[in-house]
Image: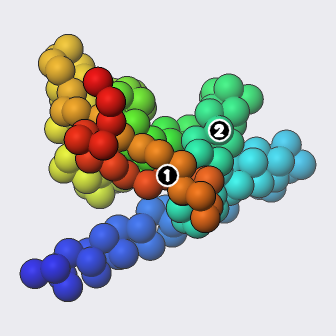
Amino acid sequence: MIFIKLHHKKAIHYIAVLTMLASLLISPAYAYEMEEANAFFEGFLAYQHRIYSSSISKLEVWLKEYPDSSIRDLALYWLAQSYYQAGNQREAARNISLFLREYPENPLIAIVDRDLKDLAHAYENGDKLPAEAFLKKNPANPEKPVRETADDQPL
């Protein structure tokens, strides 16, 4: 069962990447579009390398600079995933909720993790979100936080 889950998750990421690449190839590659695409890929690649804080900052900047982009849906999706992986459930819920609301027919919805959909639902209803994961800096790699238990945190 775990084996199937792992392959399913890997397949989902490949589908997402292929969808992203296909959407970029639809329109002619003007200098502005190339700049836009390169900026987006920086954030996406940071996510792929599990440097979530970098992915978050790059995708946040990208969304401000290109709010009307044809790949805004992808940026919202990967930003939500980045926040989720970094342990920031509130921002993950806010961004995936925005994605689901703005793009209700988007094929990426099929690969949104059930936990992330549940967070979005709770966020939209104003329900209390599950406890945020407590994070500390990883001395070996400050870009990759280490999850701690609630017991390790002072009240």
- Element at badge 1? loop
Where residue 72 appears, x then y in whole percent?
56, 38
Q: Is residue 4 above or below residue 61?
A: below
Q: Residue at x 54, y 56 (%)?
A: 138
- The mark that comes first in sequence, 1 or 2, is 2
Q: Position of residue 107 (x, y in %)?
A: 34, 53
- In contact (CB < 8 Å): disc 1 and disc 2: no
* Rendered location of residue 65, percent (x, y): 73, 29
Residue type, mark 2 in image: Ser
Q: Amino acid at mark 1?
A: Pro
The quarter holding residue 128 reads: top left
- In the structure shown, which secondary structural element does the residue marked by tag 2 occupy? helix
Q: Which quadrant is home to the C terminus? A: top left
Q: What residue is at 20 percent from the left and 85 percent from the top? A: 3
Q: Is residue 56 left or right of residue 88?
A: right
Q: Residue furthest right?
A: 31
Extreme residue toward the left, this view: 1
Mark 1 highlights which residue? 145
Residue 23 percent coordinates (x, y): 57, 56
Q: Is residue 82 visible in the rendered structure shown here?
A: no
Residue occupied by mark 2: 57
Callout 1: 10 Å neighbours few (<14), some, many (20+)? many
Residue at image coords 65%, 38%: 57
| Nearest to the observer: residue 137 or residue 41 | 137
Rendered view: 127 above or below 3: above
